[in-house]
Amino acid sequence: MSQATYKKLYVGSQINVINLTDALKEGKIIPVIKDRAESARLAGFGSFSRDQEVWVHPDEFDIAQQILKTLSY
């Protein structure tokens, strides 16, 4: 099994991330969502940022960028 390094596509609010995730899934791209604040909360730590990160496979990055450009943020 090869290990792929994912690329960060977007960082923003949870609402925008949900919208982007839905658009990516319509384009047959399955993103990875990182929520550092939630991870910190579960570990018992605090976090100042509520932003989430959207990561995609490098092979799908160009198509994902095109999908992101069609959204208005």
Image: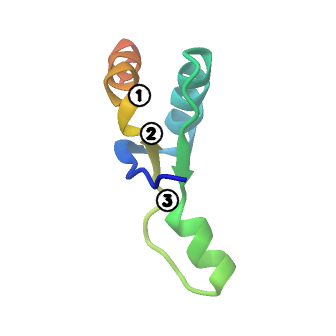
Element carrying mark 1:
helix
Q: Residue type at mark 3: give it.
A: Arg
Task: Please name which of the two marks, 3 or 1, marks the residue nearer to the observer.
Answer: 1
Query: Is 10 above or below relative to 51?
Result: above
Choose top left, top right, bottom left or bottom right for residue 27.
Answer: top right
The residue wearing badge 1 is 60
Query: Is 34 above or below relative to 70?
Result: below
Task: Please name which of the two marks, 3 or 2, marks the residue nearer to the observer.
Answer: 2
Circles 3 and 1, Cβ within 8 Å, touching? The answer is no
Element carrying mark 3:
loop
Q: Distance between the residues labelled 3 and 1?
A: 26 Å
The residue wearing badge 3 is 50
Q: Where is residue 38 in the image (x, y as percent from the top left)?
A: 61, 67
Q: Earlier in the sequence, mark 3 or mark 2?
A: 3
Q: Residue type at mark 1: give it.
A: Glu
Query: Is 26 above or below relative to 59?
Result: above
Which mark, residue 56? 2
